Amino acid sequence: MKHAARTVIVTGASAGIGRAIADRFAQAGDRVGLIARDEVALEAVQRELLASGAKAVEWEAVDVSDAAAVFAAVDRLERRLGFIDIWINDAMETVFSTVADIDPAEFRRVTEVTYLGFVYGTMAALKSMRPRRRGRIIQIGSALAYRGIPLQAAYCGAKHAMRGFTNSLRAELLHERSPVTVSVVELPAVNTPQFDWARAHMPRGPRPMGVPVEPEVVADAVFRVAEGSSREYWLGLQTILTILGNSVVPAYLDRYFARKAVAGQQTSTPLPAGREDNLDHPVTALHRTRGSFSVGSSLHALLVEGELARAACVGAGAAIFFAAGAAAAGRWRRTPR
C-alpha cells in the first residue's frame, strides 16, 4: 500500500548501506535528505536518485562528529524538505587493528563518528520530533554491538555504546509518553566499500567475515522497520546466532573468534604500502553502494524482531529441558528396584 511522502534523513548516505537506504526510500516516493562528508559523492547520489525518478533529494556535506554542524545542516534540510518523519543513523568509521597497534587518535576518531555521530544525529532528530510528538529514529547497528571480535575493538566498542545510549533514550521517551519511537537494526557482515577504504594495521587486506549480504538487503529491511514498532530487529542468521550465542556461551565465542576472526577478516592479498584510507578524509573515487565482495554474497536475509527471537530461544530451551526431564523420569520408572 502506497504511503504519503515522508521526509527521511540518512547519515552516511554517500556510499554503502546509507546510499542503498537513501535509494530505497527515494524510490518509494519519500523526500530524502543526505548527510555525509564528501560533497562530490553527495552530488553524485543526488543526480543518481533524481534520474531514477526520486521526487526530492537534498544533501548537506558535514562530518557527523561535529555536533554544531549536524544541527545546522538539519535546520537547512528541514527548510527545503519539511519536518523530519524518519531519521536513520548509519555513518561509521573503523580501523582494522589489534588494540596494541592502533593509535589513540585513530581509536578516538572511530568513536567520534561511529558512536558520537549517532548521538548527535539522534539529538538533532529529537529537536524536530519531540515538539511535534511524532517521528521514528532508526539506528543501524551490528551483531558486533553484542559480541566484540579481534581487529575491530574501536568499532565494536562504539556499537556497544550506541546500544546502551539507545536503551536509555527509549526509556526516557516511554517515561514522557512520547509517540517518538527508536529502533535498532542489528546487521551481519555487509558488502560495502568500507573494506576497500578502512584504515588497517595488518598484513593483508580487510574483508567481511563469513558470507556478507548486499547493501540493498539492508535497505529493504530498514524500509520495513520504518513501518514497524519493535525496539530491535536482527537481520540474517549470522546475526541471530551471534547474539544468542553470546548470551549463552560467551567463553566459547571468545575462543572461536580467537581462532577464526583474525584470518577470517583478511584476504590473501598483501595490504599495499601507502594505501589510501578514509579515516581523516573521504576517498571520493571509491564511493559506491557495493564493495568488492559480491562474489558469493547474499541477496536475501531473514529479518526478525529481537524480542521474538529471544522468546523462541527460551521456548526451545524449555522444551529441550522438559523433554530431557521426561525421558530421565521414564528411565527412572522403568529401572528395577
Image (spheres, grey):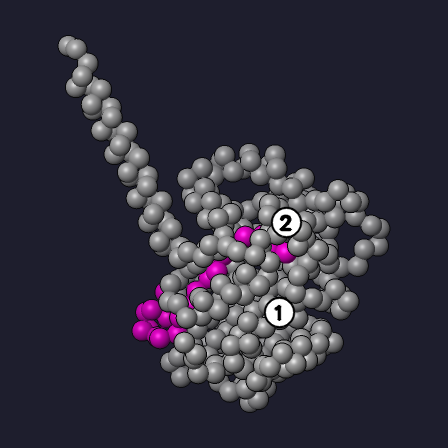
Check the image and report above or below for 333 versus 60.
Answer: above
Instruction: Determine which residue is flagged by label 2.
Output: 296
Residue 182 located within the stretch drawn in magenta: yes
Q: Quadrant of residue 306?
A: bottom left
Left or right: where 119 falls relative to 201: left
Is disc 2 placed on a helix, strand or loop?
Answer: loop
Q: Quadrant of residue 42?
A: bottom right
Residue 270 occupies quadrant: top right
Q: From the top left corner, tell me how far across and down residue 188 is, in percent.
A: 54, 52
Query: Tag 1: residue type?
Result: Arg
Question: In the depicted view, which residue is nearer to us: 128 or 337?
Answer: 337
Q: Nearer the viewer, mark 2 or mark 1?
A: 2
Q: Is residue 325 left or right of residue 78?
A: left
Amino acid carrying mark 2 in the image: Gly
Using the numbered discs, state the Cα–Cα distance from disc 2 to disc 1 in whole angstroms: 21 Å
Q: Which residues are magenta?
A: 171-191
Provide the residue designation for mark 1: 19
Q: Quadrant of the C terminus?
A: top left
Q: Is 2 placed above or below 237 here?
A: below
Residue 50 seen anywhere in this rendered image of the structure: yes
- Mark 2, Cα crowd under 10 Å, few <14 / some 14-19 / many 20+, is few
